[in-house]
Image: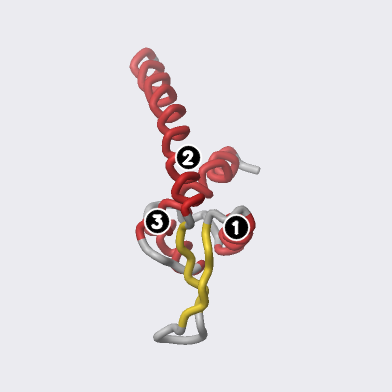
Amino acid sequence: MSLRSQLLKGILEGCILSIIKQKQTYGYELSVKLQEFGLSDVSEGSIYPILLRLQKENLIVGEMKKSEAGPNRKYYQLTEGGHNALSEFMYQWESIKEPVDRIIDIKGRRS
C-alpha cells in the first residue's frame, strides 16, 4: 500500500462526513465530490464500505429517494452522532495538521 493510500485511509471517513454534512448525498456523488477536491484516486469501491460502517455506527442514515435520472438512490445525512464524530475528527485533524505543517515548513527552510 502506498504512503498516499495509507494517509487517505485515515482521513477519508472525516472527509465523507464533512461532505454529507454540507448536503444530503449519495455514494457516487461522494466519489465525484472527492475527485473535485483533488482526491481522484478514491474509488467508489472504497467509499461504500465506509458508508456501511458509518451507518452501523449510527453516524449517518440513508434514505432511498427517487432520482430524476435513473434508479432510486440512497441519500445519506448525518445523525447527531455523526455531527459529534465530525467535530471530533476536525479537532483531532487540526491537532495533528498544525504541528506537522510547522515541522515540514521548518525542515523545508533548512534544506
What residue is at 41 percent from the left and 31 percent from the top?
94
Q: Local crowd at mark 2 within 10 Å, few (<14), some, or many (≥20)? A: some
| Alpha carbons under labels 2 and 1: distance apart | 19 Å
Residue lying furthest top: 110
**Where does the image place residue 111, in percent across and percent down from the top left?**
39, 15
Sequence-earlier tag: 2 or 1: 1
**Where does the image place residue 85, in percent across and percent down from the top left?**
50, 45
What residue is at 59 percent from the left and 40 percent from the top?
6
Residue lying furthest front: 80
Q: The disc labelled 1 sits on which kind of residue?
A: Ser
**Dots 2 and 1: beta carbons under 8 Å?**
no
| Circle 2 SS class | helix
**Where does the image place residue 57, in percent across and percent down from the top left?**
61, 53
| Circle 3 SS class | helix
Residue at the spot of label 2:
89
Place residue 21 in its image quadrant.
Answer: bottom left
Front in this rendered view, residue 43 or 59: 59
Q: Which mark is residue 65?
A: none
Give the answer, above or below, for where 63 lies relative to 31: below
Give the answer, above or below, for where 28 lies relative to 102: below
Sequence-earlier tag: 3 or 2: 3
Residue at the spot of label 1:
46
Residue at the spot of label 3:
21
Front in this rendered view, residue 15 or 61: 61
Sequence-earlier tag: 3 or 1: 3
Q: The disc labelled 2 sits on which kind of residue?
A: Phe
Front in this rendered view, residue 81 or 87: 81
Closest to the camera, between mark 3 and mark 1, is: 3
What residue is at 51 percent from the left and 73 percent from the top?
63
Horizontal side of 15 relative to 53 (left or right) equals left
Q: Local crowd at mark 3 within 10 Å, few (<14), some, or many (≥20)? A: some
